Amino acid sequence: MLNDYLNIIFFDVLKIMFLLVPVLIAVAMIVWVDRRVWGLVQLRRGPNVVGPFGLLQTAADALKYIFKEIIIPAGANKVIFILAPVVTMSLALLAWAVIPFGENIYVANINVGILYLFAVSSLGVYGIIMAGWASNSKYPFLGALRSAAQMVSYEVSIGFIIVTVLLCVGSLNLIDIVVAQKKVWFAIPLFPMFVIFFISALAETNRPPFDLPEAEAELVAGYQTEYSGMMYALFWLGEYANILLMCAMGSILFLGGWLPPADIFPLNAIPSPLWLVLKILLLFVAFALIKAIVPRYRYDQLMRLGWKVFLPVSLAWVILVSGFLVYFKMLPVN
Amino acid sequence: MLAHALIFYLFSFVAIISSLAVISSKNTVHAVFFLILDFVSISCLFIMMGAEYLGMLTLIVYVGAVAVLFLFVVMMLNVNFKELRAGFLNYLPFGSLIGLVLLIEIGMMIGTWKYRDSFIKTSEIQINNNLTNTESIGNVLYTDYIHYFQISGLILLVAMIGAILLTFRQKENLKRQNITKQVSRERDDGVSLEDVESFKGVKLND
């Protein structure tokens, strides 16, 4: 009896390690990709000194953060102040449990996978609010308020985008969502939704041009102002893990997840996890390019875009898609 | 099953403790954080009972949206507890009267309550074990109960319109942003190349 439990726990922990270690390494690599792309766009070299092509730059940075002193402000609410980066990081890693890397390669396969992803990504705002409030300082607080309003607004349109995809799939299971794209990736028939999802994902992860919560010109560093050492590094890693997660969500919803672009020989010989990783990387490079190219939005423009443009358009698209599916009798479930 | 039961009781314990902490904690922001913990553990309870759809919806709606707004409002308000406690003795007799009535009602209800087997049988809904949770809820919610569903949606809409109307104020002399105007501004609207003659200068219209 106890042996069984221990076995289950052991194998589950092993599975989780097999997922989390690559994810964490990928986060470290992606930080390097981000800085490198940013540098190339601005005709600089970017980090290229530590290790081959500068690949070990993030490891060096992490080492530096570990040895720095953690300073907790005297007026801060200690428990929540320490809890905030932990919440951000663990929520960012929690969501990876349901991401399928192949038809049978996953840690958890749950019926409501997409809802789980949506729920966990919407909880991400708490790390930021907690950090902003617990710091007991003006700039972090303003940053946290901005962030809360921004993330809640863009979640609404992400919700509607997920609904349009679900209408075409007929299931909340992530594996079903990918399998439904065997004929055509949803990015093609639902192209406007893909664009809106991409932009909302930028806003949801506080990436430029929507990085108002940490707008350095106005708010020093936003909600991270009072953080130092390892706690700052946790925020930083959590943010990038979240960005990777949004890229994974985008590739599962619109770019066919682990499926190759066409089921022909040289393409379908490549193992499925590699396809997903390639798609995530593609979306991430787009994220990085946008960071380098597009100037920051004004806050009122950001709110206007979320509520007055994306919300009506995605709502209209839900109605359009469902009307289309009903009229042409193409509904996936009867 | 033992581990399942243990985890279930762990979550229920956390839910009860955190809901007690919501009403007893002195700092309002802490109270909201305990409320969030309560919501999370309740959604875990839903999941442990096999109602994964309800659990996820609790997380998305209550924790992801409602509690964020709660937290937002509570953080911005500076609640002064001394002022709130000031009238405590004045309200004590009336408040305890209401509390007493509620206590008696709850006692009467628990004392006379009996579980009827026929409750679950009177329901006309056919439960199909082959369908997932989400499908079974959808099957009844959008067919048999569509009117209730629509009415509850309308009530929420009315509440939303009411809230907007209460805070809406028509201001005079308000400077508004016109995005189309801003975006459609061309180079020629702002810049012009002037040929300036020496010692004459140039006259700009505004």
Image (cartoon, coloured by chain):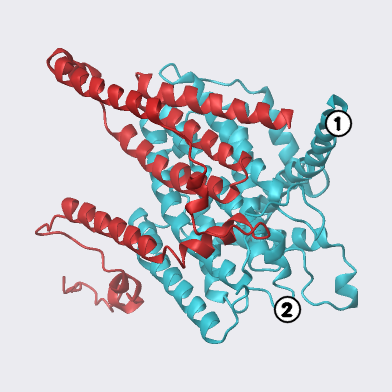
Does A72 sit left or right of A100 as displayed? left
Q: Is residue A178 visible?
A: yes
Does A254 sit left or right of B109 as displayed? right
Query: Residue A156: x and y, percent?
Result: 44, 58
Q: Nearer the viewer, mark 1 or mark 2?
A: 1
In front here: A30 or A167? A167
Rendered shade, chain A? cyan
Report the residue marked by disc 2: A183
| Vertical placement of residue A291 versus A215, above or below | below
Kindly check if marks 1 and 2 are in contact, taking CB atoms under 8 A apart as contact. no
Q: Residues within 10 Å of mark 2 (few under 14, many from 20)?
A: few
Three-letter code for the amino acid on which mark 1 is drawn: Asp
Instruction: Identify the chain drawn in red.
Output: B
Q: Residue pushed farthest left?
A: B172
Disc nearer the start of the sequence (1/2): 1
Q: Residue pushed farthest bottom?
A: A328
Does B161 sit left or right of A62 as displayed? left
Point 43% across, 26% down: residue: B19
In front here: B112 or A222? B112
Query: Residue A151: x and y, percent?
Result: 45, 50
In front here: B198 or B25? B25
Query: Judging from the image, what secondary structure is the residue with disc 2 in?
Result: loop
| Vertical placement of residue B59 versus B203, above or below | above
Looking at the rendering, in which quadrant would you find the C terminus of chain A?
bottom right
Report the residue marked by disc 1: A4
Q: Residue pushed farthest top?
A: B89
Query: Residue A39: x and y, percent?
Result: 64, 54
Query: Residue A127: x and y, percent?
Result: 51, 36
Three-letter code for the amino acid on which mark 2 is drawn: Lys
